[in-house]
Image: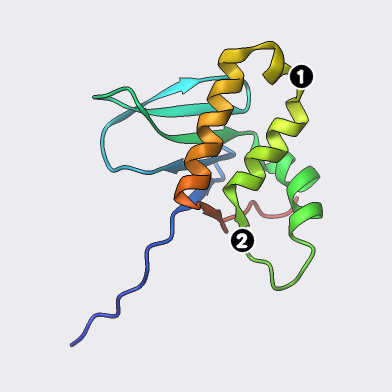
Amino acid sequence: MSAIATEYQPKALYFEDADSLEYVRTDEPHIYRRVDEFLTLILSLESRKPVGFKIKGFKNFFLRSIRPKFLHSAETDFVRMKLILEEVMTEIGNELFLNSTKGEAYRIAAEIAENDQVLVSDFPAAA
């Protein structure tokens, strides 16, 4: 019996009970560092380096901003995570410039999403 190999594609997962979208690039113990009401960076427990991120309150944001802009085509069943982070950054705009720590956290999350080419295909059910 032969196994069919499939290419690994990094994906962020939507957790309906927590209304959050999460991506972690490593399988190791980690801790969560809250940045603001939307973003939490996920850090390696051992090295304290960022290994992922979590976006909270995703359903409302998805229904308001993501679905109308990026999911208008029937063929579109995924969105690049970097686009979602850019939409969040656009929404909170000036806060990122006024708070350099927060801006840096969003930059790190966007860099992880871009470097790993993370996709989102697990979306909240429409309300």
Q: Earlier in the sequence, mark 2 or mark 1?
A: 2
Q: Quadrant of residue 123?
A: bottom right
Seen in the picture, residue 9 relative to 30 is either above or below; the reply is below
Query: Residue 59, position in %: x, y?
Result: 68, 43
Q: Secondary structure at mark 2?
A: loop
Q: Which mark is residue 118?
A: none
Closer-to-camera residue (7/30): 7
- Classify mark 1: residues with Cα within 10 Å, few (<14), some (14-19) or many (20+): few
**For discs 2 and 1, the disc positioned in front in the rendered view:** 1
Query: Residue 81, position in %: x, y?
Result: 58, 48
Q: Residue furthest bottom?
A: 1
Q: Amino acid at mark 1?
A: Asn
Calculate the distance from the C-alpha at mark 2 to the C-alpha at mark 1. Answer: 28 Å
For image coordinates 69% across by 31% down, the residue present is: 89
Is residue 109 shown left or right of residue 58? left
For image coordinates 80% across by 43% down, the residue present is: 64
Q: Which mark is residue 94?
A: 1
Q: Which mark is residue 78?
A: 2
Query: Residue 122, position in %: x, y?
Result: 56, 56
Q: Amino acid at mark 2?
A: Phe
For image coordinates 46% across by 43% down, the residue present is: 23
Closer-to-camera residue (59/23): 23
Q: Are marks 2 and 1 in contact (CB under 8 Å)?
A: no
Q: How is the image coloured?
A: rainbow
Q: Quadrant of the N terminus?
A: bottom left
Query: Residue 10, position in %: x, y?
Result: 44, 54
Q: Quadrant of residue 16?
A: top right
